Image (tube, helix red, strand yellow):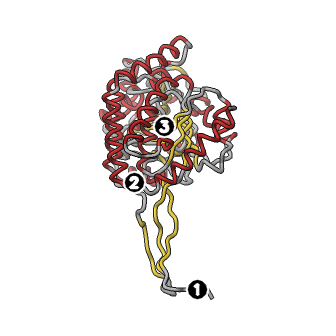
Amino acid sequence: MDIREEMRQVADRAREASRKLSRISTEVKNRALMDMAEQLLQQSSHLMQENKKDVTFAVNSGLASAMIDRLTLKESTIQDMATGIREVAALSDPVGKVTSMWRRPNGLMVGRMRIPLGVIGIIYESRPNVTADAAALCLKSGNAVILRGGSEAIYSNIAIGRLLQDVLKKHSLPEAAIQVVETTEREAVYELLQLEEYIDLIIPRGGEDLIRAVVRQSRIPVIKHYKGVCHVFVDADADLDMAANICINGKTQRPGVCNALETLLVHRDAAPRFLPEIARQLREKGVELRCCEKTRVFIPDADKAEEDDWYREYLDLILAIRVVDDMDEAMDHIARYGSLHTEAIVTKDYANAQRFLSEVNSSTVLVNASTRFSDGFQLGLGAEIGISTTKLHAYGPMGLEELTTTKFIIYGNGQVRV
């Protein structure tokens, strides 16, 4: 069987499974999800053994440290995966909810009901936890999912996928509701992206090159974010200890993820007090600083920032810093160089906080908190299937509700149109 026919069969099985899922009760889905969480913990040693094969290959292949960090499964990672699935099980099921209802002059009752999208294709790099997170969210929201991870995580993804399918079988649910593409052939991705009659939505997760390639090739709608150029703006009256903690956390906790801080903007009135100290703290953490000329007055030994630095998603211990005259200049900078991902303001001024929330156009905007909270698990979604920086049909971290759409439902009493 060639790759084209293999992918068509995968998608056909997913389409059939999605039809069956639409009539599965919340209780049955939740029991399966809780069992999945338990099985992940019980089989953690096996999962880490399979993952070790991927990590060893990645190290020998010279993959970047950020990629290896995302790839590695530890006890804590598997525990987080299980916790995320349990949280998904505890969330309200959006499927079948009537979100509104109104009566027309002719007596018709018109409403909107939430329904699954159908079949979702996930194309992702490095992160085996995506396999469990996406599968759980899709199952709870009534969608079948086709998971095509990168070749660097093939052993990990297959192991997790087979575990999840065993649970589906145990609970008399269609095994094809969760399918991991087990071939590493790149042609498989292209063939999946052509199957618009079977697959309803594609969600790519990975580097900018991967996402742009998917968008170019796909005949199916794509939810995407190209990169995360995330900003923190330290206002004139900010609590500087708070600002330092937020910046250190945003930049250094996990520098290789899309919600890590990449550019720090500092109000000119706060700069003399804040910049020398934050530079010291960042350098203690091994962070390289690339600064504008105004910033280098206070950090004279910092590297000079070039124009390209303001656009960069470093995914590394590198931070661009710029001094701005006021909040308007900070917001103008974000509008020009940002990626619509995540921005934060540190301020004591309520009016400035509200302006920042209202006027900054990114998918997640925070006041006095780290950009690292732009994450479905952290925001109470149980897990996330991705982060969208396109406004149709979702914006920001995507959970259960974003994996559904609405259809019209109409109750009549014999009405006909005249």
Left or right of 236? Residue 147 is right
Tell me whether the residue at label 2 lies in contact with that at label 3, contact meaning CB atoms closer than 8 angstroms.
no
Q: Position of residue 142 (x, y in %)?
A: 45, 52
**259 or 159: which is nearer to us?**
159
> Mark 2 and mark 3: span between their CA atoms?
19 Å
**128 or 281: which is nearer to us?**
128
- Amino acid found under the numbered disc labelled 3: Cys
Quadrant of the drawing holding the C terminus: bottom right
Camera-side mark, 2 or 3: 3
Instruction: Estimate how packed mark 1 is, as few (under 14), some (14 to 19) or many (20 or more) residues with alpha carbons within 10 Å.
Output: few
Numbered mark located on residue 354 in the image: 2
Left or right of 58? Residue 379 is left
Residue annotated with mark 1:
416
Camera-side mark, 1 or 3: 1
Q: Position of residue 20 (x, y in %)?
A: 48, 53
Residue annotated with mark 3:
230
